[in-house]
Amino acid sequence: MNRFAELLDRLVLMPSRNGKLRLLTDYFRSVEDPDRGLALAAITGDLSIAAVKPAMLRALVVERMDPVLFGYSYDYVGDLAETVSLVWPQPDNIPDHAPTLAEVVGKLQAASRSDGPQVLARLLDSASISARFAIIKLVTGGLRIGVSARLAKQALADLGQVDVSEIEELWHGLTPPYIELFAWLERRAEKPKSAALALFRPVMLSNAVDDGDLEKLDPADYAAEWKWDGIRVQAVCEGGVRRLYSRTGDDVSGAFPDLTAAMDFEAALDGELLVGDPREATGTFSDLQQRLNRKSVSLKVQQQYPAFMRCYDALQIGGEDLRSLRFAERRTRLEAFVRTLDPSRFDLSPLVEFRDWEALERLRQAPPHPIIEGVMLKRWDSPYLAGRPKGPWFKWKRDPHTVDAVLMYAQRGHGKRSSFYSDYTFGVWSGPEGAEELVPVGKAYFGFTDEELRQIDKYVRDNTIERFGPVRSVRADRKNGLVLEVAFEGLNRSTRHKSGVAMRFPRISRLRWDKPAAEADRIETLQALLDPLA
C-alpha cells in the first residue's frame, strides 16, 4: 500500500507527461502481482468499491474532531482526501504490518454498506498519512492525479515494448488484476486471446490545422467532411453482442438503448453520436447532453431526444477488417453499407465539395447548420491508423467566440492546484441601464499561464467579500471587478442557468486588466449567438 501511496504522491507533483509515464512504467515493472494490476484498475477507473461514500467519510472525521475545525481545514487545504489524511488522529498503537494494496482492496470490497465505515476507519488507523491519502482516493474514486486511462495504457505499452493499440484492442476482454496481461508484457506468456465479442478498436484521431499546414498540402489529395458538434462513438456488433463506445473506449450503450437496438449488423462503424432524426433535423449538443453520462434513460427521454449515428468510416464489415484499406475504398464500402441500415438511426456523413483551400475556408466560416464546428480533412489514400498520426487527418474548426466577462466566484483547485483559486465562475451584465446586474454564464479552469494563475489567485484573496466553504465570492460591480476574455466553442440554451445560456468548452484566453468592469459584455451579445438555433 505504501508503494501505491508513494506513486500517487509523485504523480501529483510530476508536471510532465513523459515524467508520469516513467513513474508508471517503473511502478508496473517493480511491483508484484496483484498489487500492480489493482493500481492499474484504480488509475483507469475500473476498480469498484461500493461500500463507502464521501458522506460516510465526512461522518467518520467529525466523530474524531470538531466539525467547525474540520470545515476550516478543508477550506484551507481544498482537497477532501488530503484534508482527512492530515487531520485523522494517529492511534497510540500502530500495527507493525503495513497492508498491501491487495489486502486493502480485498477488505473494502468484502465490506457491506453497514460495516464499510468501520472497515475504512480501521484501515485509516493503521496507515501513514500518505497511505491514508491513497486509501481515501480509492474509496471516493476519481484519483485526480493527472493521469488518463490512455496514459496508463501507454505506460503498459512502454513496459512491454508493444504498440498501445494492441493493449486497447485487448482491454475490454480483460479484468483486474490483469495477471495475464502483465505476463505477456514481460514475455512470460503468450498474448492474451480474448473470447469477448464486440471489442473496442483504437480510434484514429486528427491534428488541428496550424499556420502554414495547408500551404504544404494539395487539396486534390484530401476529402472534406463537416465536423459535427456531437460525440465521437464506435458502434460494434459481433455475434449478436452490441456495444456503443466513446472514443476513449468507455461503453456508453446503456444510455442509448434505442440506437443499440437498431445495430442489427456485423460491423464496426466510426462516427458521430447526435440526437434528432437525420432525415429531418439534427438536435444541438444541449439536446444530446440530456442523455450523456447516464447508466439508463427513460422511454420519455428516448422519445424526446432520439439518438442516431452519423457514420464516417468503416473499420470492419462482415468479419473483414478494413483498416488497412485506403480511405477512398473504405468510404465506398461504407456508403453501400449505410444504405442497408435503419435511416432513422444511421446516416452517412456527407462530403464537402471544394476546389481549393480558399473556397473551403469560406464554407468553414459559414456552414449550412449551426451545430457544425468546422471541417475535417482526410487523405484519400490514408489507412485507418490508431492514435494521432501527423498528416492523414486534420480538423479545421471555426474560430472560437469570445466574450468579456467579469469574475464572480473562485474555487480552489485539486492536486497541485489545491493551494490556488483556479476554478472561476464569470458573468455578463443583464437588465435595464442603471439597474444592471451580473448573471453567471460559465465556468473555466484552464487557458491561463502559471503566472496568470498567481495573479488571479492574489486578486481573489485581496477582493473576497464572502466565503462558501471552498468557494469565494469576489468584489464585482460596475466600479470594481476583474474582466476575463473568455473563449468558447458555442452556446446552448439552458433552463438550469439564470442567464438562459450554457457555454461549450469555455477557457480563459486573456486577462483584461486594461478594461473596466462596467465595459464588460451584456447578455444580449450572447443571446444573439442563439438566434440561429431558434
Image: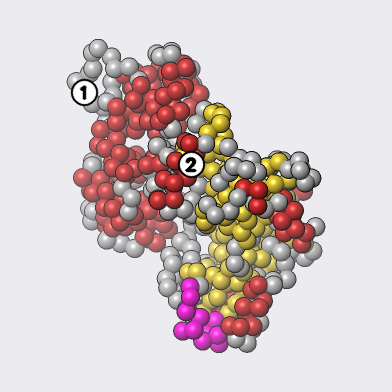
Say what amino acid the circle numbered 1 marks.
His
Mark linked to residue 97: 1
| First reached walking from the N terminus: tag 1 or tag 2 | 1
Q: On the image, numbered disc 2 is attached to which residue?
A: 459
User: Is 216 above or below relative to 253?
Assistant: below
Asked if the magenta segment contains residue 212, the reply would be yes
Colour scheme in the image? secondary structure
Query: Pointers 1 and 2 in contact (CB under 8 A)?
Result: no
- Nearer to us in this view, 64 or 480: 480
Closer to the camera in the image, 496 or 28: 496
Q: Position of residue 21 (x, y in %)?
A: 30, 53
Q: Residues within 10 Å of mark 1 (few under 14, many from 20)?
A: few
- Identify the secondary structure beneath mark 1: loop
**Residue 214 shows in the view:** yes
Residue at 61% of width from left, 68% of height from top? Answer: 398
- Quarter of the C terminus within the rendering: bottom right
Give the amino acid at mark 2.
Answer: Tyr
Image position of 97 with respect to 5: above or below: above
Residue 286 at least partly seen = no
Highlighted magenta segment, given as a residue range: 210-222
Quarter of the image holding residue 263? Answer: bottom right
Report whether 301 appears left or right of 160. Answer: right
Q: In this view, does 204 lie above or below 154?
A: below
- In x, y percent, where is residue 85? 35, 26
